[in-house]
């Protein structure tokens, strides 16, 4: 799990998460009309720093369990005092790093998501899951499903730690400052590789998948800001929807296959033909060939 210029590589997650949950053909991103225009014209989507998301326990659910297990497991390698010292340093450091997240849903047409994320006359954008994963890996992002519940979190936290402890077993005791720094950084990266993909069981109905990128404190120079009440400044980083992959020929106009489906949400008072054709034209003029669908929801705002 070496750190690279494009973020902290979360190498165990893609394969592990991909095997844990059968990926759907499409992942849906709910948003409003203004954001749709920005996404399509700029061919980028914003990943928000986790501290501004709706779960106040983001990251900490998994991290708390892993650090508790860490104290016990490291005691066998380094003794009680050194174990406590490492755990305390990790507890203070991991949450100073930035973790950028963009959320998707397995479901195309959910009332809760229309209401909370898209609002009246919003949209859900249907991303091709496998293509999204391909360009995520190329940009140092990780795509995976969120796993829910304390019991599952505890079991996986324990397994993750035990699977990685052998990487520390060759270090001499007591640890010198360089080794201590390396151990703490390694364990912080371990936490940030897994923690964004775990949430409280109370969020289970969201059926969420996430696009995640973890970086150092400065966001690897790619962190940007926007204004949003009541936070003031909100940090985010951009995810490119049309990157040039290694060995790939330049794309042709209208050939971007990443977003093949778009669903128009409830509350849109434009007549059906107009709203469908205008949605299609927006995407087509910006290089996306899509099928436009209509919500079946009768949600009233």
Image (cartoon, rainbow, N blue to C red):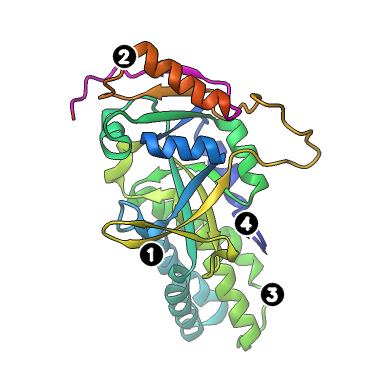
Near mark 3 (Cα within 10 A), the count class, few <14, some 14-19 or many ≥20, is few
Residue 240: quarter of image: top right
- Does the stretch in magenta take in 296? yes
Q: Is residue 84 above or below residue 240?
A: below
Q: Nearer the viewer, mark 2 or mark 1?
A: 2
Position of the N terminus by quadrant: bottom right
Instruction: Find disc 4 in the rendering and name its residue.
Output: 9
Residue shown at 48% from the left, 55% from the top:
100
Magenta range is: 286-300
Q: Is residue 10 above or below residue 93?
A: above
The answer to whether the residues at label 2 and label 3 have Cβ atoms under 8 Å apart is: no
Circle 4 sits in a helix, a strand or a loop, which is it? loop
The circle drawn on residue 271 is: 2
Residue shown at 57% from the left, 72% from the top:
185
**Which one is earlier in the sequence, the residue at label 4 or at label 3?**
4
Residue sitting nearer the eye, 233 or 180: 233
Residue 285: quarter of image: top right
Instruction: Find disc 3 in the rendering and name its residue.
Output: 170
The circle drawn on residue 64 is: 1
Residue 131, percent across and down? 62, 32
Circle 1 sits in a helix, a strand or a loop, which is it? helix
Circle 2 sits in a helix, a strand or a loop, which is it? loop
Residue sitting nearer the eye, 34 or 102: 34
Q: Is residue 83 above or below residue 112?
A: below
Question: Marks 4/2: CA distance?
Answer: 47 Å
Q: Nearer the viewer, mark 3 or mark 1?
A: 1
């Amino acid at each position: 799990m070496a750190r690279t210029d494009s973020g902290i590589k979360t190498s165990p997650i893609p394969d592990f998460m991909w095997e844990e949950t059968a990926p759907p053909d499409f992942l849906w991103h709910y948003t409003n009309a203004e954001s749709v225009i920005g996404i399509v014209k700029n061919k980028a989507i914003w990943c928000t720093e986790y501290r501004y998301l709706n779960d106040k326990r983001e990251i900490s659910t998994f991290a708390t369990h892993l650090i508790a297990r860490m104290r016990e497991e490291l005691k066998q390698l380094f003794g009680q005092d050194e174990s406590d010292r490492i755990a305390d340093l990790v507890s203070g450091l991991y949450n100073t790093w930035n973790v950028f997240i963009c959320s998707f849903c397995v479901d195309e047409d959910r009332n809760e998501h229309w209401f909370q994320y898209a609002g009246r006359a919003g949209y859900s954008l249907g991303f091709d899951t496998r293509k999204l994963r391909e360009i995520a890996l190329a940009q140092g992002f990780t795509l995976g499903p969120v796993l829910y519940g304390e019991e599952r979190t505890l079991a996986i936290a324990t397994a993750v730690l035990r699977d990685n402890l052998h990487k520390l077993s060759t270090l001499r005791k007591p640890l010198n400052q360089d080794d201590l720094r390396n151990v703490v950084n390694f364990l912080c990266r371990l936490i940030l590789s897994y923690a964004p993909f775990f949430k409280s069981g109370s969020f289970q109905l969201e059926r969420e998948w996430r696009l995640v990128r973890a970086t150092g404190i400065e966001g690897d120079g790619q962190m940007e800001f926007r204004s949003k009440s009541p936070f003031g400044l909100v940090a985010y980083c951009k995810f490119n929807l049309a990157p040039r992959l290694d060995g790939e020929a330049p794309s042709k106009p209208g050939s971007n296959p990443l977003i093949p489906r778009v669903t128009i949400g409830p509350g849109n008072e434009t007549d059906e033909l107009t709203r469908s054709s205008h949605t299609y034209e927006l995407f087509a003029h910006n290089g996306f060939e899509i099928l436009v669908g209509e919500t079946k929801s009768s949600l009233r705002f």
